Amino acid sequence: MNDDALWNMKASALLELMAAGEVSSVEVVEAFLDRISEVEREVGAFLEVMQEEALAQARRIDKLRQSGEYPGLLGGIPVAVKDNICAAGAGCTCGSRMLADWTAPYDATVVRALKEQGAVIIGKTNMDEFAMGSSTENSALGVTRNPWDLRRVPGGSSGGSAAAVAAGEVPLALGSDTGGSVRQPAAFTGVTGLKPTYGRVSRYGLVAFASSLDQIGPLAADVKDLCLLMDVISGFDERDSTSEDRPVPSYSQALSRSTRGLKGGVPKECLTQGVSPGVRRCFERALEMLEELGIDIKEISLPMTRYALDCYYIIAPAEASSNLSRFDGVRYGVRAETESFEKMYMRTRRNFGPEVRRRIMLGTFALSAGYYDAYYLRAAKVRTLIRRDFKRAFEEFDIILSPTAPTSAFLLGERTQDPLSMYMADVLTVPANLAGLPALSVPCGFEEVPGSGGGGEGEMVRRLPVGLQITGRPFDEETVLCAGHAFYQAVAPGVEAELARMRKGLGRASQGSTRCCVQGSG
Amino acid sequence: MVVGLEVHAELLTKSKMFCRCSTRFGDPPNSNVCPVCLGLPGSLPVVNGEAVRLAVIAALTLNCQVNLRSRFARKNYFYPDLPKGYQISQYDEPLAVNGYVMIPGPPPKKIRIRRLHLEEDAGKSLHAGDDITRAAYSLLDFNRCGVPLIEIVSEPDISSPEEARQYLEELRRILEFTGVSDVKMEEGSMRVDSNISLRRAGQDQPGALVELKNLNSFRAVVRALAYERDRQSRILAAGGTVLRETRGWDESLEITVPLRAKETSEDYRYFPDPDLPPLVLSEEWLEKVRREVPPLPEEKREYYVNVLGIPAYDAGILTSSRKLAEFFDECMSEGADPKVASNWILSELLGYMNSCGLGPDAIPTSPEFLVKLVKLIEKGVISGRIAKDILVKMAETGRDPEEIVREEGLQQVTDEAFLQQVIDQVIAENPSAVEGIKKGRSKAIGFLVGQVMKKTGGRANPEIVNIIIKSKLEWIRDA
Amino acid sequence: MTLNAGARSEGKAAPKIDVKHVARLAMLELEPEETERMQRELQSILEHMKELFSLDVEDVEPSFGSFDGAELRLYPDELRLGLCSEEFLRSVPAVRDSYVMVPRAGQEQRSSGEENHSRRELQAKNER
């Protein structure tokens, strides 16, 4: 293993190598499959690895290239897909026992777009059950560990996708973001992740958690790679009534724009409660670097965002309680056979894990007779106030800056007993979902936490990645990505050196393991 | 007696409300399905514009105020035939409100319509196992799932079973005539639920509301309401209290039976469907639809009588069904004479259809063919008598009348030399008739014409025959 | 749960959730000890949301989504191929003669009246 290994390279570099004929897609895919089998025992990012299909697709792409045909924007590049996005013929478990044996009969619009652009879907990644969680610990089908510290969570709910990219198991991955589920794990695992504007990417084929908040988003090692995915998945879809019919720019090309003169706002509310000193230090250093890049930074106030988390934990469960009603054992998924359908429903729905049950209960309550006005309707009104805050802010500012999460990755099991402490992990990310805004998480440094200690290999200090969140105007992903790219280039030498060191440390435990990394029954 | 009716009608679209699966009735089970109408994980609804157009036509025809902005909402409840665990419907922002229907009475009365909204249908369950004590299960077919429906909710303005019947008849006629729905209760494309309560004499407030379900025909509505009226008044007369509950109509026993107590009624947890932005209609679009609204039977009837000169009674029959009126209208656009076409439709075509038990939606020939037939008579190619036989053949085979005439050699005989011969023969064979004519019994001419027609198989042109016979007999008289 | 714990309003106590009723609405079966835990957890979540009630939202329009002024698109009434019957039925847990098979409604959903009516009622109910 060395830094020149194919699996250690970015998608943009791999595309160049393949275009130049220096490597084939089969070689690239095999490199990543090998890497998966090397580290997966430790990381546990995947629920299903589609080895045969991936190699078959790679061979097709190679043939296309050989015959001089254009293989598409992502020709031959492996992509991992979160297991709540349907790919025809593959499992789609949503991290739940409920769908443990279900095979999706159709492609999500984003999956179809990936296939049309030559991407190689290499596997489906682990996640919190039905995307409800911030650590991937709510998956009923396996444990995903943070590659930076295997005792820690990768964040969630797209923890599998984030961990896979961080560990070098795949260069690109798709996640979904309802309250931070792409950005927060990206921050925890030191990669980049974007939640696009609501309506920018089709939700058709994404198993709904909270329909008015959900967006599919890309994860990658850097912003340039992120743009490759965005260029493929963005755009209007006639199957999604909430997708917007407006032109899609080339995000990759937008990166060359200058960031000089951009106005950045820092909400004073974002550094109050719960932000760790390490995260705060990283963020403050990031602001200095942004100023050095010519971005004009000022403090602003978004007074209503302090209500965002409460608002989110009413709206998201309310929608979820309805979205998850379809899991009744009648047409698909597991079924508990009993003498009446009511009993069958209740027994079948026992397959939901505790967090999912909790949110269904909370959401059902918020919509129930007598409480609708006090909870759901009130939250919908507060959502308007939050949206207004942002609208006002964006009259003056081009981007809004904050840490992505108040802390770096926490320990496995640390917050599972206290739902409220888990919910706090979303406090800085949910406002963008409530307002439908594009928001990017990009690595901005490291927080030092106690290491595993002890003798032998245990070190005293462990460095954990911290993310910077850049939020933009609706459908102005270009500015967000452009600023993120400029910033990342400034931090890249340090971040990538740490990343390479972390990646090198992985896989020691799996010597002699076979290439078998299918967990659960996906 | 205070009654309000909730009527569901399936809209006549080709595809479903939120996906493009077929709405065809009677296809093999679970053959018209897709991820959307099956509620597969990840699927999303997209709205059928034609369903919106038809619902707006219904709303306009029912004198409703159409809301330019309305919203779809989810009605949450669990039932095996409801795939998503919620029905997409409309709740506090319906498509249309404040309409009315006039019923004939006597006396005529205005029944107000509270609201009209769009929603999707559920699947269909068949029940197996004859007895609740036996192992029992249901069989589900999702073909109907997602078929567009309108729900029309009346105000409680109905005060007798007969008024309920008239209101439903009126709705059915309007929905059928405007092409919004085929309103067949037997196929379930029109369904009725009812609310009923009795007002105690001397009290302003009506009593407890009883909801009636399973009303599968107009007759069932009338009988069930009459039964409920009597049942509730007996309870009240005996000093009892009517329970607020849902009751079902038992067709065979002709009674209502309790289904579930209203106190434990469902909490549907309605909320705006986050998958669908608000439905916004423009003034221009609404104006366009307003112009497209087909005229109602009474408007059409007036037009037939006043403009086309058709007798009122005939116009009434022609406008008794949309299909029939459409057929007639198409005959007009094919250039037929209104009265002639109307006569042919009413006496011959409907006569034939009645004799075979065909309804107005199964007219066995096309307007184009009927007009061709009429034109064949006008041009003198065939006689009126032959035309009647040809019509039967057209109806039985669906063929073109010109083709029938050509192939079967039914053209009228106008060859005078040939007719002279036949007439001479007839005169020779009927001396007594000729004698009669000589004595001035002009009726006998008709007899001779008849004989000529008989000999020519009805193909002789009766006018020419008449002229020849008259001229020959004049000659005879002169001689 | 809000950022400024110090600013928490002194609003009235959160309502007590009728967990059993809510579970019935949600078609969830809770074990006795789960009911208790659920009650505790939901109650503490609601307690933390109290600050939301300090806001005056009387005249605020609700946002039910992020579609700012987006209008619903209407699609032409044209047939498109869906799933074939076999494709769908493959994933169904119990099938008979191309129908999806499920156990029938339990007693509580059936007639609360005379037993001998229930079959017909159910049939009729589902004719709808």
Image (tube, coloured by chain):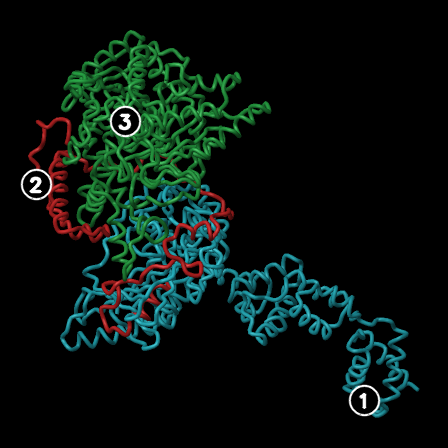
Chain colours: A green, B cyan, C red
The x and y percentages for residue B275 are 35, 41
Q: Does any portion of residue A396 appear in the rendered image?
A: no
Q: Amino acid at mark 3?
A: Pro
Residue denoted by label 3: A185
The x and y percentages for residue B155 are 30, 60
Q: Quadrant of residue B133?
A: bottom left
For the residue carrying disc 3, how many other residues have a C-alpha within 10 Å: few (<14), some (14-19), or many (20+)?
Answer: many
Q: CA distance from mark 3 to mark 1?
A: 115 Å
The x and y percentages for residue A497 are 31, 12
Dot 1: chain letter:
B
Q: Is residue A357 toward the left or the right of residue A477 in the image?
A: left
Dot 2: chain letter:
C
For the residue carrying disc 2, how many other residues have a C-alpha within 10 Å: few (<14), some (14-19), or many (20+)?
Answer: few
The N terminus of chain A lies in quadrant: top left
On screen, A500 above or below B475? above
Q: Are marks 3 and 2 in contact (CB under 8 Å)?
A: no
Question: On residue C13, which mark appears?
Answer: 2
Eye-nearest disc, 3 or 2: 3
Report helix, strand or loop for mark 3. Answer: helix
Q: Is residue B50 toward the left or the right of residue A40 in the image?
A: right
Q: Does any portion of residue C16 appear in the rendered image?
A: yes
For the residue carrying disc 1, how many other residues have a C-alpha within 10 Å: few (<14), some (14-19), or many (20+)?
Answer: few
On screen, B134 above or below A237? below
Q: CA distance from mark 2 to mark 1?
A: 114 Å
Report helix, strand or loop for mark 1. Answer: loop
The C terminus of chain A lies in quadrant: top left
Q: CA distance from mark 3 to mark 2?
A: 35 Å
Question: On residue B440, which mark appears?
Answer: 1
Name the foreground residue: A283 vs A341. A341
Q: Amino acid at mark 2?
A: Ala
The x and y percentages for residue A77 are 45, 25
On screen, B427 above or below A486? below
